[in-house]
Amino acid sequence: METNLFSPVALPYAQDALAPAISAQTIAFHYGKHLQAYINNLNAALPGSGFEGKSIEEIVISAEGGIFNNAGQVLNHTLYFTQFKPAGAESAPEGALAEAIKRDFGSFEAFKAEFQKKGAGLFGSGWVWLAADKEGRLQITQETNAGNPLRRGLKPLLTFDVWEHAYYLDYQNRRPDHLASLWQIVDWSVVAARYEAE
Ligand code: MN
């Protein structure tokens, strides 16, 4: 079977557009080096693995070991890098997603506080996620290493990367400050589209 090779998602903004939440230097390493390495590792591992021709989501749901780790990181970073907009006025969710956030967390402010708390409190490397179940109910999950809510049967909507490579150049050990800064660049129209997609 022909092997499908993965490639980095295109960034929908300039590399310096997310500063000061995420500097151009961090994008250069995080997107240009870390994500590229996960992609290279995954592509190298695919031939003969049984996962040739599968989508990244299919691989993440069913793979284990090194293929899971690299595929998870490819999918996680793809969702991460495409959920941001240039720094500026903070936006807020609208429509069905806004209603679901209010229903399931009490308010948008309460959701943000809980999301930051769970991101700050995740021990070691990983990802904090907003995810939806099949009925559209929302929850925040903490996933270690390359984890993704797809593994729990949930749809991933929004994620903050808490691996140190995501913030160390800009915020050093101040993970909570970095997480708080990310609300300035979340593109809620992207998150809402993920929520409303079949
Ligand atoms: Mn990362």
Image (tube, rainbow, N blue to C red):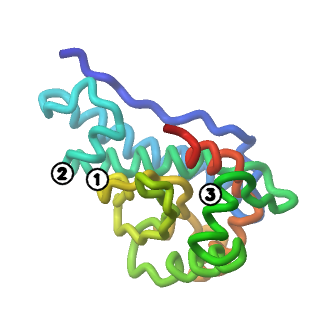
Tell me the SS state at disc 1: helix
Amino acid type shown at disc 3: Thr
Q: Which mark is residue 69?
A: 1
Q: Position of residue 10 (x, y in %)?
A: 60, 34
**To which residue does mark 2 refer?**
64
Q: Residue at x 35, y 40 (%)?
A: 57
**To which residue does mark 3 refer?**
26
Amino acid type shown at disc 2: Glu
CA separation, marks 1 and 3?
22 Å
Quadrant of image for the N terminus:
top left
- Is residue 86 visible in this depiction of the protein? yes
Q: Position of residue 70 (x, y in %)?
A: 32, 48
Q: Position of residue 34 (x, y in %)?
A: 46, 51
First in sequence: mark 1 or mark 3?
3
Q: Residue at x 53, y 53 (%)?
A: 157
Q: Is residue 187 left or right of residue 41?
A: right
Mark 1, residues whose alpha carbon is within 10 Å: few (<14), some, or many (≥20)? some
In the orientation shown, which residue stands out farthest toward the right?
A: 89
First in sequence: mark 3 or mark 2?
3
Q: Is residue 167 left or right of residue 72?
A: right
Q: Position of residue 67 (x, y in %)?
A: 23, 45
CA separation, marks 3 and 2?
29 Å
CA separation, marks 2 and 1?
7 Å
Q: Is residue 85 left or right of residue 4?
A: right
Amino acid type shown at disc 1: Asn
Q: Quadrant of residue 55?
A: top left
Tag in front: 1 or 3: 1
Q: Is residue 185 above or below residue 28?
A: below
First in sequence: mark 2 or mark 1?
2
Tell me the SS state at disc 2: loop
Tell me the SS state at disc 3: helix
Mark 3, residues whose alpha carbon is within 10 Å: few (<14), some, or many (≥20)? many
